[in-house]
Image: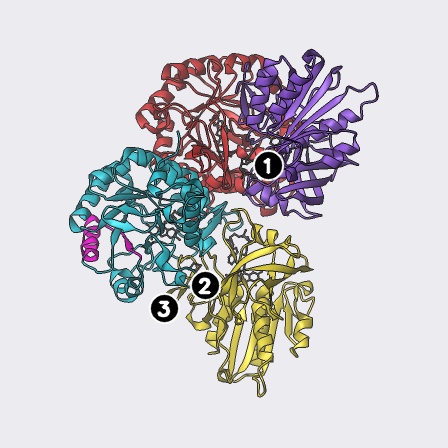
Chain colours: A cyan, B red, C yellow, D purple
Amino acid sequence: MANKKTADLKVNLGKLKLKNPVMTASGTFGYGDEYSEFIDINKLGAVVVKGLSLKPKEGNPPPRIAETPAGMLNAIGLQNIGIDSFIKKKLPFLRQFKTPVIVNFFGDSIAEYVKTAKKLNAIKGIHALEMNISCPNKQAGWSIFGTDPKVTFKVVSEVRKMTDLTLIVKLSPNVTDIALMARVAEDAGADAVSLINTLTGMAIDIKTKRPKLANITGGLSGPAVKPVAVRMVWECYKSLSIPVIGMGGIISAADAIEFILAGASAVAVGTGNFINPEATVNIIKGIKSFMLSEGIKSIKDLRGSVKC
Amino acid sequence: MANKKTADLKVNLGKLKLKNPVMTASGTFGYGDEYSEFIDINKLGAVVVKGLSLKPKEGNPPPRIAETPAGMLNAIGLQNIGIDSFIKKKLPFLRQFKTPVIVNFFGDSIAEYVKTAKKLNAIKGIHALEMNISCPNKQAGWSIFGTDPKVTFKVVSEVRKMTDLTLIVKLSPNVTDIALMARVAEDAGADAVSLINTLTGMAIDIKTKRPKLANITGGLSGPAVKPVAVRMVWECYKSLSIPVIGMGGIISAADAIEFILAGASAVAVGTGNFINPEATVNIIKGIKSFMLSEGIKSIKDLRGSVKC
Amino acid sequence: MSRLFKASVSENKELIKNHYLLTLNPLKKIKKPEPGQFFMLSVDKGLDPLLKRPLSIHRLTGGNLQFLYRVVGSGTNILSEKKTGDILELIGPLGKGFPFKKTQKNIILVAGGLGIAPIFALAETLAKIPPPAPPVLLFQGARTEDEVLCIDKLKSIGIDPIISTDNGTLGEKGNIVSVLKKYLTRHSLPVNRYILYACGPEPMLKSLSSLAIKHKLKGYIALEQHMACGLGTCLGCVVNTIDGYKRVCKEGPVFPIEKIVW
Amino acid sequence: MSRLFKASVSENKELIKNHYLLTLNPLKKIKKPEPGQFFMLSVDKGLDPLLKRPLSIHRLTGGNLQFLYRVVGSGTNILSEKKTGDILELIGPLGKGFPFKKTQKNIILVAGGLGIAPIFALAETLAKIPPPAPPVLLFQGARTEDEVLCIDKLKSIGIDPIISTDNGTLGEKGNIVSVLKKYLTRHSLPVNRYILYACGPEPMLKSLSSLAIKHKLKGYIALEQHMACGLGTCLGCVVNTIDGYKRVCKEGPVFPIEKIVW
Ligand SMILES: Cc1cc2nc3c(=O)[nH]c(=O)nc-3n(C[C@H](O)[C@H](O)[C@H](O)COP(=O)(O)OP(=O)(O)OC[C@H]3O[C@@H](n4cnc5c(N)ncnc54)[C@H](O)[C@@H]3O)c2cc1C
Ligand SMILES: Cc1cc2nc3c(=O)[nH]c(=O)nc-3n(C[C@H](O)[C@H](O)[C@H](O)COP(=O)(O)OP(=O)(O)OC[C@H]3O[C@@H](n4cnc5c(N)ncnc54)[C@H](O)[C@@H]3O)c2cc1C
Ligand SMILES: Cc1cc2nc3c(=O)[nH]c(=O)nc-3n(C[C@H](O)[C@H](O)[C@H](O)COP(=O)(O)O)c2cc1C
Ligand SMILES: Cc1cc2nc3c(=O)[nH]c(=O)nc-3n(C[C@H](O)[C@H](O)[C@H](O)COP(=O)(O)O)c2cc1C
Ligand code: FES
Ligand code: FES
């Protein structure tokens, strides 16, 4: 057994330094307050908050979630309190911790993305931005931000001009060639990419003959999607020089390690928080003890080390 | 409760008439012989056999399968006995039954697809062809058959010229726009499309640090993918005028009915056969009793009847 | 006292077909739940079913938690097979319960079907309030006589419910809301001296709320919605209210009856 | 006699840490399994774990099926929590067992670790052959003394195994193949009068097969591979042989030792 002191979990995402690679996935951790009862937020690599927009959004009508085999569909519709309320009411709470805050955001037009990024860039206590170009629950047409390489390039480069914070681009898995989309984000100036957002799915209640979600389709997350996510992380890792943040079905330390072996610099826990609100800290502990028992000194040595 | 006689399960796929909409998914039912011990093959809507090629194929080295949450990855690599052996050794067995035989096939080039289709077209006891353009376990480059609309159009139209049998095109879910790919197949002359083939995925053994499959990546199937499959069937149904055959995670009658509500004319059971070798006949029974209890006279009234 | 804890099954008893009474023994000290609050229960070790299931607290007995549930799908089906000694993981108590503590009014409880699960918890708590306790009237509806649950337990706390069944096999024939309506008109109750607490299937709560609004009867209802987190973070469980979408797991499950937009 | 059937758990006993003996009572008449054949067992009602788990038949006792298994992952972990009365679904018996019926030769059985599960089944069956039965020699290897299973059962059928453990806590110290090797050379056995049946971890079988080939000792080994269908249709469970890929579930799990390409 290696010496306790030798497991170094630190990772960098652009300028941003994390004490360990475990973050929360946007939309599954609120603004941190509800989970502070279960875990010590200081222990997290980073907190990624629920996706924000310039103005508050009501979101979709209920029902918004449906369970599926080893997964769930959601069509929250990016309900959020808006940037101003976030800054006033939620950020002060998060500022107490020694954990970086990453703000996930989106817009309904390139102009809105740009305006939002500019505004967020000026706020103390926000350490990085994650731009969501990949929500499956927006109106038709919105999806081009995350599926049409030209639009992706445009929106990311415009946002890039507005911020010197670490800029993470959150990619959609609903594409033919994920590595291509990731390269486009890199070329447009992203400091990191995060993936996967949810896979577009649908479920129907055969008794009522209605879709289980009022929004008809929704985003599939949870363990069910893990094999797709791991494959996509691996494909992106091989073709990028910026870090990849992996997510999709992570519930245990073994899941997180799988993503790191596939090339993830950091990982995020989404649906896993619902299954066990202590999931994130258990995963951090588990990664550490895996490294100790395997004699792996730095998490960097684990990254992308799958033997193919 | 409606009269027993009023549940009409018959469906047509092009010229092909099926007594009910439940088929087997290629590669999960062998050539029918192993399952005849568990079910009466006469009861099936159709048997779709393991994907065949002109010459026999060895397939990929083991390990070829890995279990994932509510799903499985496979990288069989289209191992098959070749068309000649199939015709000689397997088809005579299948000819005994009053159930149509659909031959799933593939080629490594457009010329090979064409040659194979031509050969199969001439064989008695083959009632329809399903061309697989969507296997995730072939060498790089092969995937363009199922992901590049131009290549798809070309290969389907060339095959179309060779056969007057019902021609089903099996689509890949690993694309940005499934409805587009389906329309391309329709425009090129397909009589029906079937979907989904497997989603490309990957799993890593964290102890050995090796991919769980020798082929590194494989195809994800089973209940985990059902929401994605249902969504894609619904998208194709809305934009096609030819029938859609739905599959992906069907294990129970309720699953099958979900696909039919989403627009599937017929459904196929794949991984479900492994979970329960009687799955297909249980599903047929279950659909029938659902129709009787709901007073639905014809399966056609169920098709696409999701209330959105 | 973390609200995440494990508990062992003390008993899991089928009361009538598909209806079970589950008694759990928490493996550590937990926060005491209020009537109307709920817990999220894991039902399986595997990843399907994935999400925990929300169940209202039915009864607290000597440190044990009791839940009353009906088998409706795969999760409750698996739950029904749990045996003494099996371990479940829970989160709770969650949400806001029935606000009854300061009420000076006469109390009308309305329980449709399994709605008796939390309503009994409330009735039992009310019964323990030292005199002068507010008088309690309980309307209980079910489909058939067999499905009228908790009769003996209600008797033991001194409550004699006004029962109605859809098929008239016990109590009045008809739905509980029309029985209540008749009662209100017949006795011409001074509604401002009464307060309502209700739980039951959605259609019942909907017609109850029309009745309450029409009669200017104030009160609270406990709602259900599909849930992922139970903690207020996923925003999955909202219902529409006159103040916008509200989370059933956080602002609810108990809402003022007049707030809900049906 | 369909090979798909349900069985109830009669007993599920932990023998030593993580090793269980599962006794199942089939709910209908089943086909009698041969030593070396296996069953696919469902371990859960939910959809995760999804696939059935392959386990070798360990023993037939009065109509009951016995399996000896080790907890290695989520499926066997869930299996280990089954209690008397729980119902499992099975398919089997499957595959080809050890071909021993017509053999006139002296028999050498080799069981590494859990390999004793099917090897015991074979030993017991051989022990029942009416005289003149072929003499049976059993080499049994394990990591430590604790993990040497079935000693008493072997004694009861008149077999006194030659034991080796990795740490030398019981029997000879060292691995089972080198113990067999020493035995072969020390006694200079006339290998053409002997036949080998073996099961155990892959590295052991691999070195055993080199030894067998080198000494021209004929025999059979039972292999493992991840399986989906167990019936020969998915082509998922192949191993490489000198005749190409062969399905462990159909052409195997028992293969002639010299056929396997490692
Ligand atoms: C606050 C609250 C308290 C509840 N208290 C009780 C109780 O005391 N007794 C009782 O029998 N039932 C109660 N329910 C309903 C109970 O949660 C569901 O019946 C149960 O989740 C069904 O799970 P299933 O897997 O059997 O059904 P499925 O239909 O197979 O479940 C599929 C998914 O839908 C969800 N779901 C299905 N029906 C409901 C529902 N009515 N409400 C919320 N989620 C649902 C499940 O949780 C699961 O995620 C309560 C629900 C809520 C929200
Ligand atoms: C023909 C045959 C007979 C067997 N007989 C026995 C026996 O008598 N006693 C015993 O303890 N074990 C036996 N095994 C191994 C046993 O099947 C595995 O240990 C078990 O499937 C592990 O499941 P798990 O969910 O606990 O492990 P996990 O590693 O979580 O399983 C993940 C997946 O891999 C598969 N898998 C993992 N290990 C193996 C393995 N060694 N062989 C095949 N599939 C595997 C599982 O079935 C599952 O699909 C046998 C295997 C085969 C093929
Ligand atoms: C309820 C819910 C809400 C989500 N909201 C957001 C969001 O606001 N912004 C975003 O970029 N991703 C959002 N996601 C996607 C997750 O951040 C994550 O990418 C995805 O769920 C896959 O990870 P998982 O399987 O661990 O959940 C949401 C996911 C869920 C389940
Ligand atoms: C083991 C295995 C082998 C398969 N082989 C083929 C094949 O040869 N040709 C083909 O078109 N699809 C093949 N498929 C895909 C299935 O036919 C089906 O499209 C997919 O598995 C989704 O359905 P399911 O979730 O019901 O399994 C295979 C799938 C599995 C699991
Ligand atoms: S269940 Fe997640 S917010 Fe209510
Ligand atoms: S397990 Fe399917 S062929 Fe062997």
Report the quarter where the N terminus of chain D lies: top right
Q: Amino acid at mark 3?
A: Asp
Ligand 6 rendered quadrant: top right
Residue tagged 1? D52
* Lower position in the chain sequence, tag 3 or tag 2: 3
Residue tagged 2? C249
Mark 1 residue crowding within 10 angstroms, few (<14) / some (14–19) / many (20+): many
Residue tagged 3? C243
Is residue D173 highlighted in magenta?
A: no
Identify the mark at residue D137; answer none if there is no mark: none
Judged from the image, the secondary structure of the residue bearing numbered disc 2 is: loop
Q: Assess mark 1: CB under 8 A from ligand 2?
A: yes
Q: Quadrant of residue B147?
A: top left
Residue toward you, D50 or C223: D50
Residue D2 visible to an observer of this rendering: yes
Q: Amino acid at mark 2?
A: Cys
Above or below for C255 versus C55: below
From mark 3 to mark 1, how far is it between C-alphas? 50 Å
Q: Residue C164, position in %: x, y? A: 64, 70
